[in-house]
Image (cartoon, grey):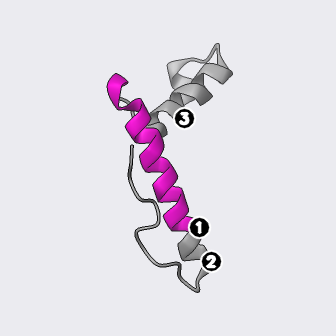
Amino acid sequence: MEKNIYEKKPSPCNCLNIRRASQAITEIYNEFLLPINLKISQFSLLKHINQLEPVSVSELAV
């Protein structure tokens, strides 16, 4: 994981800089979860469902 996270010059727009940082962090997590064929978005959803237990399928569908 020797990727340069500073590939782009910082923008004067803070929102853009935060978005880029968020994308870089997402890539790091996705790379980490690659061996179990999961993305961070899927992991977050599963973690949230786990905290709601017991929960029915109908409750999840709402």
Residue 37 visible in the picture: no
User: CA gap, disc 2 to disc 3?
Assistant: 26 Å
Give the residue pinned by disc 1.
18
Quadrant housing residue 17: bottom right
Q: Which residue does the image show at 45% across and 34% down from the upper left?
A: 42
- Which is nearer the N-term, disc 3 or disc 1? 1
Q: Which amino acid does label 1 sit on?
A: Ile
Q: What x and y, as percent, mark residue 2?
A: 39, 48
Q: Give the range drawn in magenta.
A: 18-37
Magenta region includes residue 6: no
Give the residue pinned by disc 3.
44
- Is 7 situated above or below 5? below
Observer-nearest of 6 and 37: 6
Left/right placement of residue 3 relative to residue 56 reads left
Q: Which amino acid does label 2 sit on?
A: Asn
**Circle 2/circle 3 CB separation < 8 Å:** no
The dot on residue 14 is 2
Q: Which residue does the image show at 53% across and 75% down from the upper left?
A: 16
Quadrant housing residue 54: top right
Q: Main secondary structure of the magenta part?
A: helix
| Crowd band around label 3 with a 10 angstrom C-alpha radius: few (<14), some (14–19), many (20+) | few
- Is 29 situated above or below 46? below
Q: Which residue does the image show at 56% across and 17% down from the upper left?
A: 56
**Circle 2/circle 1 CB separation < 8 Å:** yes
